[in-house]
Image (cartoon, grey):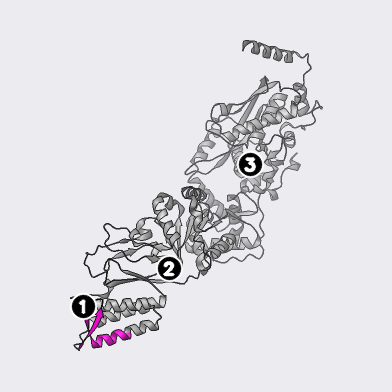
């Protein structure tokens, strides 16, 4: 029957490496074209949407992704200035400037400082300032006119010209003057993304650093926040940080909704200075994983009122020739940032194989680049050869750091504390395949699990011992009910099913869930009912529906590799086999050790799409027809459909009648 086993070509992905010429460039924009397109649309000047939500798996460094998206971002920088208000010291002016206007304004302020510190000794001219007369030296007046003229040539607004003139006239009358820097503050909005790495009032809105006296003739010292530097730019905030400071989020949202920042939001106690409001045109990018984004939407269902653009980063990318080139180029770019050597041609295939294994699909590559970089770093650090052998050594070295649970499991098989049978045949016993997952550190790994079934006369109820012992989840319970439905529709459509049974996962002491053992459990029950033995060197995995179709399961590679590993631990010398769902063909990506075993006929892998196809591999005879008494189904059907005068049926009826009277 090994003739129908899968060939090696179907057990691993195959990539076209012709015309591959990777560069050393980061390629997020090309690998994530949909997200890049959304980002470009969001950042257009004529797009009035204020918030973009970028959701990605936790393994993404979303800052790095957005930084690559923003490489060609063209945001016109806007300058801003706080200027001391001589008329109302606690109410400084807040004005907008162009980038060129800022340079001209700062130059004018320096010229005014020089002018005020210079001794002219000439005739005084009376100038009106509010309701008072201010006396300015004639030569100073001429110099001020030249300063204002140069500002006017820089196309500074009339408001700024007036404020500069007003400030100069005020400073002339001060009894002492030190520096002009205490009377104004300018800043530029960032031309690219502004990342908020800590979502606090100080980092978002800024902070008053020193409190000026009530009658002070200077500006209050202030530390600007991210919103000031993003007043006409893009601010990036992590959704998880927002969830930790919900009140602050609603204050920020109010600023975005009104396009106005009030300076009373700055951190500080007993603020005596309140500059004029700042007009903002900030765009906000919210980043985070699915859980964080879902919690944010729950926190603020009205977030869409700001005009929301949403985009989601995928887990993987299709392994086309073009994408493979981009993928390898991106890995080279990440290696270059770490000052490591680029990939050699000998590493291309093993890196791509590992990328496909991470996403469990032969035609896709995982975008968890950091998981791929880790073995390459280990390879360089330990000076392994830059080929597939060295890459596998690096993987093994990394796995040995966090596989204590697997070592403990393997020891239990080696010491025969965990009972597993890999030879001969048994009635009502089968080897299923499971994957053990852990929270925190620890790699998931596969191992076989012995499943047994007992049947006895009853009312057709099949008990799931795991569920009754509260060691199984709801999905597992559902799978057992599906098995019950399948057996009844196949064998007992006209009357009750006269047998009951128990199904047990032997030596399973932790909670289990999932339906991947339902095919194995159904086969164990068929064996127990028919009294036909099951081949113990063959393990089975697959989910089952009520019509007998075999459905795909997760962790298929770990399951096969785990079964092969345990078989070698218990010194099983005879060939072993595995039956898997046909739907899992695209997920196969097995280790070189397992592939060698397949090539040497020590391991055979079969695929099935129905339970009827699986039966011959386990029972060494076909499922057959219900009326064929020599087949598996025929033997069971005969037992189910006993003659009316059969003693066992009579005993069953008498027991039922007795139970009714007792009730």
Res 436 visible: yes
State which tag comes first along the sequence, 2 or 3: 2
State which tag comes first along the sequence, 3 or 1: 1
Relative side of 562 to 604, left or right: left
Residue reaching furthest to the front = 131
Residue in front for this viewpoint, 595 or 160 = 160
- Locate the N terminus by quadrant: top right
Q: Would you name the residue on which mark 1 appears?
A: 173
Relative side of 638 to 87, left or right: right
Compute the Cα span from label 2 to label 3: 49 Å
- Locate the C terminus by quadrant: top right
Instruction: Indicate the position of residue 191 as horizontal and vertical percent values.
Output: 45, 69
Q: Would you name the residue on which mark 2 appears?
A: 190
Q: Would you name the residue on which mark 3 appears?
A: 553
Q: Which residues are magenta?
A: 123-146
User: Residue at image x 75%, y 27%?
Assistant: 491
Residue in front for this viewpoint, 243 or 504 = 243
Instruction: Indicate the position of residue 428 as horizontal and vertical percent values.
Output: 67, 26
Q: Which mark lies nearer to you, 2 or 3?
A: 2
Tell me if residue 136 is in the magenta stretch.
yes
Compute the Cα span from label 3 to label 1: 84 Å
């Amino acid at each position: 029957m090994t003739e129908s086993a899968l060939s090696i070509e179907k057990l691993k992905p195959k990539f076209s490496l012709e015309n591959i010429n990777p560069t050393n460039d980061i390629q997020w924009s090309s690998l994530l074209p949909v997200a890049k397109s959304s980002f470009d649309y969001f950042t257009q000047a004529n797009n009035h949407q204020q918030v973009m939500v970028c959701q990605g798996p936790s393994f993404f460094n979303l800052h790095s992704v957005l930084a690559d998206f923003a490489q060609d971002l063209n945001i016109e920088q806007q300058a801003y200035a706080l200027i001391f208000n001589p008329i109302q010291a606690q109410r400084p002016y807040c004005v907008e400037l162009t980038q060129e206007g800022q340079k001209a304004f700062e130059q004018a302020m320096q010229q005014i400082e020089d002018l005020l510190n210079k001794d002219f000794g000439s005739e005084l001219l009376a100038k009106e300032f509010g309701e008072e007369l201010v006396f300015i030296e004639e030569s100073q007046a001429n110099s001020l006119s030249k300063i204002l003229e140069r500002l006017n040539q820089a196309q500074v607004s009339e408001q700024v010209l007036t404020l500069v003139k007003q400030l100069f006239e005020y400073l002339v009358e001060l009894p002492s003057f030190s520096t002009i820097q205490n009377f104004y503050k300018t800043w530029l909005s960032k031309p690219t993304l502004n990342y908020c790495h800590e979502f606090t009032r100080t980092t978002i809105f800024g902070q008053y650093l020193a409190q000026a006296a009530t009658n002070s003739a200077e500006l209050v010292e202030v530390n600007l926040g991210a919103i000031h530097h993003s007043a006409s730019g893009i601010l990036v905030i992590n959704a998880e940080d927002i969830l930790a400071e919900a009140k602050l989020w609603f204050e920020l949202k109010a600023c975005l909704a009104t396009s106005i920042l009030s300076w009373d939001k700055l951190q500080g106690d007993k603020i005596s200075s309140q500059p004029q409001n700042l007009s903002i045109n900030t765009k906000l990018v919210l980043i985070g994983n699915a859980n964080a984004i879902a919690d944010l939407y729950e926190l603020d269902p009205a977030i869409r009122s700001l005009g929301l653009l949403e985009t989601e980063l995928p887990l993987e990318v299709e392994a086309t020739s073009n994408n493979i080139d981009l993928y390898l180029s991106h890995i080279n770019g990440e290696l270059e940032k770490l000052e490591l050597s680029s990939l050699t041609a000998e590493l291309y295939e093993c890196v791509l194989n590992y990328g496909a294994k991470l996403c469990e699909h032969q035609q896709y590559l995982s975008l968890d680049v950091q998981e791929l970089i880790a073995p390459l770093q280990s390879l360089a650090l330990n000076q392994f050869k830059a080929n597939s052998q060295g890459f596998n050594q690096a993987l093994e070295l990394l796995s040995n750091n966090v596989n204590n649970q697997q070592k403990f499991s393997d020891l239990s098989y080696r010491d025969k504390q965990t009972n597993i049978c890999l030879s001969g045949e048994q009635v009502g016993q089968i080897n299923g395949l499971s994957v053990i997952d852990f929270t925190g550190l620890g790699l998931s790994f596969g191992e076989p699990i012995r499943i047994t079934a007992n049947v006895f006369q009853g009312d057709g109820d099949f008990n799931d011992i795991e569920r009754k012992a509260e060691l199984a989840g709801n999905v597992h319970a559902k799978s057992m009910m599906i098995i019950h439905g399948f057996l009844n529709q196949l064998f007992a459509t006209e009357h009750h099913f006269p047998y009951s049974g128990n199904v047990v996962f032997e030596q399973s002491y932790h909670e289990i869930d999932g339906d991947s053992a339902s095919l194995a459990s159904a086969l164990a029950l068929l064996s127990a009912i028919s009294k036909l033995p099951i081949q113990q060197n063959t393990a089975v995995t697959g989910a089952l529906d009520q019509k007998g179709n075999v459905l795909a399961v997760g962790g298929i590679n770990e399951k096969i590799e785990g079964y092969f590993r345990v078989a070698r631990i218990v010194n099983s010398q005879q060939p072993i086999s595995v039956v898997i769902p046909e739907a899992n063909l695209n997920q196969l990506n097995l280790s070189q050790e397992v592939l060698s075993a397949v090539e040497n006929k020590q391991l055979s892998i079969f695929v099935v799409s129905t339970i009827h196809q699986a039966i011959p591999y386990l029972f060494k005879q076909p499922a057959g027809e219900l009326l064929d008494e020599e087949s598996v189904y025929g033997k069971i059907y005969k037992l189910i459909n006993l003659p009316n005068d059969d003693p066992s049926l009579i005993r069953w009826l008498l027991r039922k009648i007795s139970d009714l009277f007792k009730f």
